Amino acid sequence: FEYNEKYRLLYHFTPQYGWMNDPNGMVYADGTYHLFYQYNPYGARWGNMHWGHAISKDLVNWQYQPTAIAPDKLGAIFSGSAVIDHDNTAGFGKGAMIAIFTSAGDRQTQSIAYSLDGGKTFTKYEGNPVLSDANIIDFRDPKVFWHAPSKQWVMSLATTQTITFYGSKNLKEWTRLSEFGEGLGAHSGVWECPDLFPLTYEGKTKWVLFVSINPGGPNGGSATQYFIGDFDGKTFTPDAMNYPLWLDYGRDNYAGVTWSNVPAADGRRLFIGWMSNWDYANEIPTVNFRSAMTVARTLRLAHNGEHLIVASEPVKELESLRREPLSLADKTTFDTVTFENFLPNNQGAYELTFTVTPNDTDSFSFSIENAKGEVLTYLFDIANKTLSVDRTKSSVAFNANFAEMLVKAPLTAKKSYTVRLLVDKASTELFVNNGEVVQTNTVFPSEVYNTLRFKTEKGTLNLNDITVYKLK
Ligand code: FRU
């Protein structure tokens, strides 16, 4: 296997060889986090979909496992989820790990497979498929959880441009509960990869529904929208809000869903997304593999001053990768501050954190740059309440869709902004104000960015607590 090719990320999950897209079947069991994923073991473009598999003790260091689920007479293995059947509701065994996925043949149907050895090997249920519908062509990506109050498994399924919920006592027989989404949110592409889960805000439980959409993201191509509301075991009722809301405004966070079976004592809602975009995913300039996952993230509800949002931040375990912090001196500037060679022996894997306080200015920016003149700029446009990422000059050219425009996110005006940027050879993940604004964007620079520049047109910028960590 070739681990050293130029854009092989250093601290993100990438497939050993071949193509990867959506994360699938994430489940925690007996001290191990499982990550399955859409996988083509035969080549670095989409096709022959299997479930690849990796395991981790800490959501940071991953070990490759043998391919978990392979195509059969019902079709290729598309996206889905996994649960632990503590009460043996399906009859495969107490504590069985059960995968629920789409069989993509002539038609899309839902199938199940079980593992009695902790996810090492899976046996497909002989009664597959367990759910089909002759009338719906785009009928896929089952995400299942146990809903204790109604004593049933609940499946969220993408059904063209709505999400249909189904209920089951045994994961084998499913009944339609309700359908959500007509006329609400973004609809200019097919709906995919739903996830319905509870989060609490100030002690109150709200239900969040993730729906990935492609195309039709806020900055083109694929992106994940969400709804916040209530779920009674049958119907999801969204709160009145200005939809669509987007989990990540960057171009490269798609089809992400959350881990199941995380112990209540941990209490986190853990997420990972596919760090690419269908606009160009098959053409990114890698050779032996294609695509990476985002870092694992923790989700929470936050209030942005106007309404509830889902904020996301890297899991705390990621901090274990930090080498000694390198502090840059606090600065106040009227125009430009440049830190050249800000990271000695820069291998392209680092984390940058700082606090910026603008005074009497409508906009300011910071950028990371290299000696080839490639530059990635973050523009805080306070007057227009947007945070834009300009990657038009960030990378080598490879696809017309990649770097054509500014990637925009809404920004609430604040006195100061805390910024956390994760950079890994070919990826950037920006978290502002503890994950209230998130921008994940891939980049393909011809050499590492090692200059950091801040600029303001007017007024002053106070820069504090600027810290760089090389990441292991
Ligand atoms: C989303 C998606 C899913 C599908 C899978 C196929 O990226 O299109 O809807 O199950 O990819 O690989």
Image: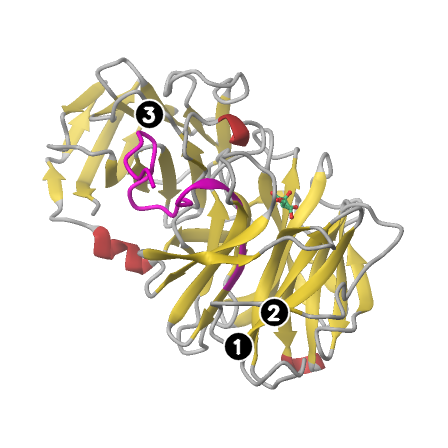
For the residue labelled by badge 2, is the local secondary structure a helix, a strand or a loop?
strand
Q: What segment carries the magenta color?
A: 1-26
Residue on which disc 1 sits: 116
Q: Is residue 6 magenta?
A: yes
**Residue at horizontal 61 percent and vertical 69 percent from the top:** 123
**The N terminus - image quarter:** top left
* Residue 208 appears in the rendering: no
* In this rendering, position of residue 150 left or right of residue 366: right
| Mark linked to residue 125 | none
Q: CA distance from mark 3 to mark 2?
A: 53 Å
Badge 1 marks a residue whose secondary structure is: loop
Other-residue count near label 2 (Cα within 10 Å), few / some / many at <14 / 14–19 / ≥20: some
| Residue 125: image location, x then y, percent | 69, 70
Are the two marked residues, 2 and 1, in contact with CB atoms closer than 8 angstroms?
yes
Residue underneath mark 2: 123
Residue 112 magenta: no
Q: Amino acid at mark 2?
A: Thr
Taking 393 as reference, is 275 above or below it?
A: below
State the residue at coordinates (57%, 51%).
50
Q: Residue at x 21, y 45 (%)?
A: 471
Residue 260: percent from left, percent from top? 52, 68
Quadrant position of residue 83: bottom right
- Which amino acid, mark 3? Ser
**Residue on which the image places disc 3:** 365
